[in-house]
Amino acid sequence: MQRATWGSKLGFILASAGSAVGLGCIWKFPYVTASNGGGAFLLVFLAFAFTLGLALMKLELALGRAGRAGIVGTFKQLGGKHWRWVGIPTVLGCLIIMMFYGVVGGWTIAHIKMTLFGELSTTNTAKLSSAFSEFIKQPVTPIIYHGLFLALTLGVVIGGVQQGIERLSKLLMPLLFILMLLLIVRGVTLPGGWKGVEFMFNPDFSKLTIDGVINAMGLAFFSLSLGMGVMITYGSYIDEHTHIPGTAMWIVGLAVMACLLGGLMVLPPVFAFDMNPGQGPGLTFISMPAVFAHMPGGVLFGTAFFTLLLVAALTSSVSLLEVAVSYFVDELKWSRRMASIVPSVLMLIGGIPASLSFGPWSDVKLFNMTIFDLMDYLTSNIMLPLGGVVTALFGGWVAWKTVEKQLAHGNQLPAFAMQTIRFTVSWVAPVVISVVLLKGL
C-alpha cells in the first residue's frame, strides 16, 4: 500500500509546528520562565532550541523520510529487525501521555463552557482555586470532558494525513496565532502590563541557576516534540522534493515563536494585576480567569483564551495519536479506522484512573505519586528522555549514512554543517539529554 504524503509543504510545516505548539507553550512555558528568572532563562532556552533542538529535528525528519514508516518501522528498516523493539516503548509512551494529557485537554473544554456562562467571573483567586479543585475532584464530569477531547482528536486523525491532520492544521494554526496576538495586545495595553514584557526580555543572570539551565534544556527539547516519535512519523509523510534542513528551521522557528507569544500573552496581565507569575501550573486555570474578570469584555477574552488552549492541545494530541496509528497500520496492517479507534479507546480507559486521582482515588499512590503524577513522571522524566537518547545514538551512529543522504537531498549542505549536525546528534545530544534524565530521576 502506497504511503500517504502531505499535500503541501505549508501543510506539513503547520502540522509539525502544531505538534510542538501544545499546552506546553501556553500553559507551561510562562510559569517555567517566570520561575527561573525571566529573560536570562529565555536566552538559554533559545540557545538550546536553535542548536540541539534544531539538529535533532533535522535528524528525526530525515530518519522518517528514509524509513517511510513510524518509529518502529523506521528503526527496523534502517537498523535491522532487532531495532524494532527499541521503538515500541516510544509508541507506548505516546499512549500513556495521551491518557493524562487528554484529561487536561478536557479541562480546557470545560473552562470554555464555564467562562462563556460567567461561572468564573470573579477576581477572587481563592474562590477560583476552590472551584477548579471541586471540578477536577468530580468522579464523572471530567471524564466526560476527557472523552469529548479524545473524540475530537479521533475525528481528525481518522480522516487521514491530508484530509484530517493537514486540513486541521491549516485551519487551526493561523487561528491560534491570531487569537494569541489579540490577547497579547489586550494584556500589554493594561496599566502595568509592560512590566511583564520587561521581566520576560530583560536578562538578569544573577537569577539563573544550574537547575534553571537544565530546565531550559528540558523545555527546549520537549517543546519541540522530540524524542517521542512524532517527528519521525510526520517525516515519513514528506515527499522527496522537500529540503529537510530548511523545513526543520521553519518548524523550530514557529514553535519557539508560539512559546514567546505564550509568555507575552500570560505574563503582562498577570503583572498588571500584581499576581505571582511563578506560582506553577495553576497560573492558567486559576490566575488567568481572575485576570479576565478584571478586564472589560473579560468573558469574551477569557473564552478566546481557553479556546486557544484547546486548539493548542488538539494539534499536539493529534500528533501523539498518529504515532500509535502509524504503528498499527505499518506493523499490524490494520485499516486506518481501526488503528485510530483502538488506541483512542485505550486512552479513554487509561485516562479514567488519571482523572479519578484528583478525587475518589486521590489516596491511591505508587512511589508516593498519584496515578496522574506517575504517568506524567514516567513519560516526561524517563521514557521521552530515553527515547531521545536512543534516537540520537541510532541516527548518529547506526543510520548516519542514510540520514546524511536525506539531509543533502535537493540542496547540498556544506561539509562543515553536516559534520556539526553529526557531532551534535552523536555526542552532544545524548550527553545533554542524559543530564535532563538524571535530574528527573
Image (cartoon, rainbow, N blue to C red):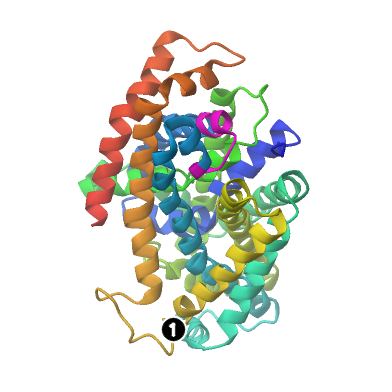
Left or right relative to 24: residue 337:
right
Q: Quadrant of residue 257?
A: top right
Q: Which residues make up the magenta segment?
A: 62-72
Whether 395 is drawn above or below 89: the answer is: above
Does the stretch in magenta take in 31? no
Magenta span: predominant SS is helix
- Give SS at disc 1: helix
Q: Which residue corresponds to mark 1?
A: 126
Task: Evaluate whether residue 195 shows in this view.
Answer: no
Q: Nearer the viewer, residue 28 or 245?
A: 245
Residue under the image location 59 percent in, 53 percent down: 328
Q: Can you give x and y, in whole percent of width and height, for residue 264 in the image?
A: 52, 51
Q: Label 1: few (<14), some or many (≥20) within 10 Å?
A: few
Q: Can you give x and y, in whole percent of width and height, for residue 307 in the image?
A: 66, 64
Whether 290 is drawn above or below 130: the answer is: above
Residue under the image location 44 percent in, 71 percent down: 282
Q: Residue furthest right?
A: 163
In the picture, the quarter occupied by the N terminus is top right
Residue under the image location 64 percent in, 80 percent down: 114
